[in-house]
Image: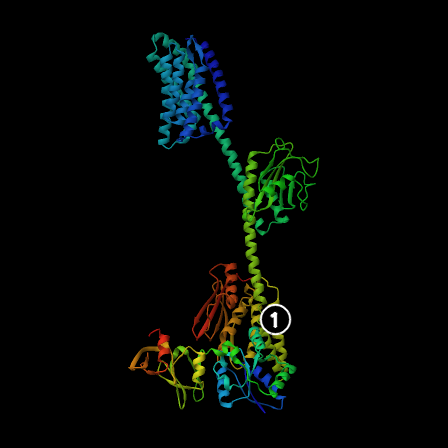
Amino acid sequence: MDISSSLALSVALLQQTAIYLIIAYILSRTPLFIPLTRTTVRWRHQIACYVIFSLFCLMGVLLGLPVVNANAQANTPVIGAVLAGLLGGPGVGLAVGITGGLYRYELGGLFALPASINIAVQGLLGGLTQRYLVRRGKTELIFNPFLVGGITFVAVLLEFGIDLALARPFDQALYIVSRLALPELIAAPLGAAIFVEVLVDRRERIERASRAFSGKALEIAAHADGVLRDGFNQENAMLVARIIYEQIGVGAVAITDREKILAFIGIGNDHHVPGTQIASRHTLQAIANNEVVYADGNEVAYQCSISPTCKLGSNLVIPLAGEDGKVIGTIKLYEPKTKIFSMINRTLGEGIAKLLSSQILAGRYEQQRRFLMQSEIKLLHAQINPHFVFNALNTIQSITYEDIDKARSLIGDLSVFLRKNLKRPTEEATLSDEIEHIDAFLHIQLARFSDRLFVETDIPEELLTARLPAFTLQPIVENAVKHGTSQLLQAGRIRIAAKQLDNVLILEVEDNAGLYEPRVGGDGLGLNLVDRRIKNKHGDSYGVTVVCERNISTLVTIRVPREAAS
Amino acid sequence: MINALIVDDEPQARRNLRRALEGAKDIHILGECGNAFEALTAIHKDKPDVVFLDIQMPQVTGIQMLSMLDHTKMPYIVFLTAYDEYAVEAFEKNAFDYLLKPVTNDRLELTLQRLRSGLVSQNLGALPEANHLRQVPCFGQNTIFFLKIEEIEFIESRMAGIFVTDIKGNERPTALPLSILQNRTSLLRCHRQFLINMDKVQKLNYVESGVAKFVTTGGRTVPISRRLLPSVKEWLGIK
């Protein structure tokens, strides 16, 4: 056996395999190869697998090098067949093998029959190996280049066995095989291993891209979360634009409402100034038609509408949808003339727009709810019972004849009461504020019903600093008088107490009338509103509860969390 | 002299009005009452010419109290209120006299002039609440007992007066004539001398042709007059 000629053939076959691999590499950059990056049972993927590897198998036959004569070739269809089996399973492997085998048989020659059988057997071998690995749960090994190389090596050995068994005359077959052995045993496993490496590489690229994509999307979502809930204004838009700009890394990011630019960050920020009117016709078009407008600078011309020297060369305008799909603004991504607008950024941009839209919506809803609450509180404050005020004045007028000092102090009480009621509602108050309020109120009531109202209060000093929603206690105490004790013929008694249990501040207002009736709307406003405000702020485990024993007592209990002593 | 009664549940409010009235030499203040119950007793006992009547009072308001009085033998009413848009509107529409608390001297003088010029009769029929009786005031020795309509079995008119029998069989006198009780409640006139609460009727017994009587849930009998039997039957929906 001539070692040097065998080596020469090996090098030649390796060169052929290199061409083969270059084609594989080029194809791997196309979407055509995506189905090959995973083992699959889906029939569409299997068909793709069959078609692609059949082509490679035929190419392996085609790129064969004549050995001794043109009818005996050193070739590598084994790569296509084995890989088809490994990736597509025994069925696909066999199908590819038969396809390649038939083609090889057509070429004729001494090895025509054995060579064609070889390819089919090799396809089957790949397929059986895949089935074995899948059953053992070692699917990932299919993409291991060493394993693939090994299997291919075995497949080539098998090929020689079949060649020797079927080709006649035997001595010529043996001669040819001895010439083929080294080149094929080197080139085929190496080619198959590198082929798989190309596939793995391709898969990683896809995954890396989608990982980067979802990573960016999540990052933006996490950073931008809640920013626009506080309102869709310049300040918040600027924050969000910065997050997007930093995360996506486009040339510039802008956010607009329907009329003006709210935020602009990036290239061209010298002439794209937040607060100015929208000039871009793309933006106006996106707002008017509620559609995504994309100007890549090639097919759709892009020219900055503000400055002719602007470096920006392409933009994507995505509308932000508000209630009922109405456009409330846009988000714009720009790339400079020197850069291509990437697909990923386009998709990402549209995703971000959706995210921001829903945030703005949630924010508006929240704002509306808060506004409603505020106006209800205002209403409550404005609810100074005129009957109470005029009766108070009447009482004070009468007392001026008897006890001028008392009358003076009652005028002070009435002033405190009115001032507190008319004060712009604040969010929070201390218990001592609230007590001051009801003290003023009760002093007047005691003067009015001097013969039949008695009030008892028990407020521990250390609780006076406790915080609670302003205007919590007064409506409850007013109810106790108005709908309680003032309806009694005999003496009315009101007890007001505060205590702390664990971390809960408990306020109790009890009267001896027992006339409480749950009212729908109307007068119930006070009590319901107090309850709703507390629940709104602190959750459903707090709020107002009422226990009424008919004609005996009504006990109203208010529960609010007591923050750690501050 | 004009005899006046002050009715208000707030002591200082009574005192304030008393002071204001004391300036008028021809006004004699009979007394002060703190609620409708005291007021009814005083009106029956002292027969004032004019009642200064607060509207907002416990349990029975000033206007509800009027439903417990015979409008034909009524003192002149001057309503008192600190603030009550709806009532004031009704007073103005029907030319009732009213004073807003705290009372100013000029306004009070106007009312006093009206009183001196002669007490005209007031059409209290214009106030719906003054014509709908929810409970019947029954006068005891020193107390007034309020009987809810649903606690009444029947009311009888005798020589000695009008008597209300409740579901427990207790009999109490009331000062309201049968005609007013009939007009202001859902009680049914079944006899010249009887009003019956049809919700408390157990059965109707025919005694002889054209004469029948009710048996109440308490087992007491109430006669039905020959003349009123057809209307009673019609009410019951029988022929």
The front one of A149 and B113 is B113
The image quadrant where one finds the C terminus of chain A is bottom right
Rendering coords of residue A33 (x, y %): 47, 27
Among all residues in the image, which is located at the extreme bottom?
Answer: B1
Q: What chain does badge 1 belong to? A: A
Q: Is residue A69 left or right of residue A269?
A: left
* In the rendered image, the vertical position of residue A170 relative to residue A321, given as above or below: above
The front one of A307 and A76 is A307
Rendering coords of residue A451 (x, y %): 53, 82
Q: Can see residue A154?
A: no
Q: Residues within 10 Å of mark 1 (few under 14, many from 20)?
A: some
Report which quarter residue A317 is drawn in.
top right
Q: Can see residue A176?
A: yes
The image quadrant where one finds the N terminus of chain A is top left
Which residue occupies 41% across, 25% down? A147
Task: Kindly identify which residue carries mark 1.
Answer: A418
* In the rendered image, the vertical position of residue B8 relative to residue A376, given as above or below: below
Rendering coords of residue B220 (x, y %): 32, 82
> How is the structure coloured here?
rainbow
Rendering coords of residue A173 (x, y %): 36, 9
Which residue occupies 49% across, 31% down? A204
Q: How many marks?
A: 1
Report which quarter residue A127 is drawn in.
top left
Q: Secondary structure at mark 1?
A: helix
Q: Is residue B22 left or right of residue A47?
A: right
The front one of A225 and A172 is A225
The front one of A313 and B111 is B111
What residue type is disc 1 on?
Answer: Leu
